[in-house]
Amino acid sequence: MSESLRGGSHATPESKRRAPPPDVADLVEVEKSEVEVNGSSTVAELRVVAQEYDIPNYAKLRKPALLARVRKALGLS
């Protein structure tokens, strides 16, 4: 069977795998003191703070739950 009929070498399962997401802290440089822990904070800012405070599963949380956990970690709630 020719390579073109099999999909070629570019169709290997390895090439279809997505790369792991980059670390949020590498993408957004935010100081903890700069983040207003309220509804105006972005999810990226909250994730940086969550990462600094070792909040488990922070990447899977939606904004309301993430905000609640960050506030708890900072002692604001």
Image (cartoon, rainbow, N blue to C red):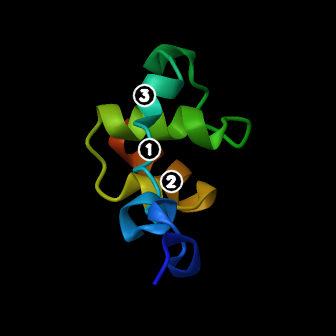
Percent coordinates x, y for residue 53 in the rendering: 29, 36
Q: Is residue 5 left or right of residue 22?
A: right
SS at mark 3?
A: helix
SS at mark 1?
A: helix
Q: Residues within 10 Å of mark 2 (few under 14, many from 20)?
A: many
28 versus 49 height, above or below = above
Q: Which residue is mark 3?
A: 25
In contact (CB < 8 Å): disc 1 and disc 2: yes
Q: Is residue 19 left or right of residue 42?
A: left
Disc ID at residue 66: 2
Residue lying farthest to the bottom in this orientation: 1
Please name whichever residue, 8 or 15, is drawn nearer the observer in this view of the structure. Answer: 8
Give the residue type that dot 3 points to: Ala
1 versus 67 height, above or below = below
Give the residue type that dot 1 points to: Val
In contact (CB < 8 Å): disc 3 and disc 1: no
Percent coordinates x, y for residue 73 in the rendering: 34, 42
Q: Residues within 10 Å of mark 3 (few under 14, many from 20)?
A: some
Disc ID at residue 70: 1
Percent coordinates x, y for residue 72 in the rendering: 39, 48
Q: Residues within 10 Å of mark 1 (few under 14, many from 20)?
A: many
Please give the name of the residue rendered at 54% of the width and 24% of the height, measured from the top-left corner: 28
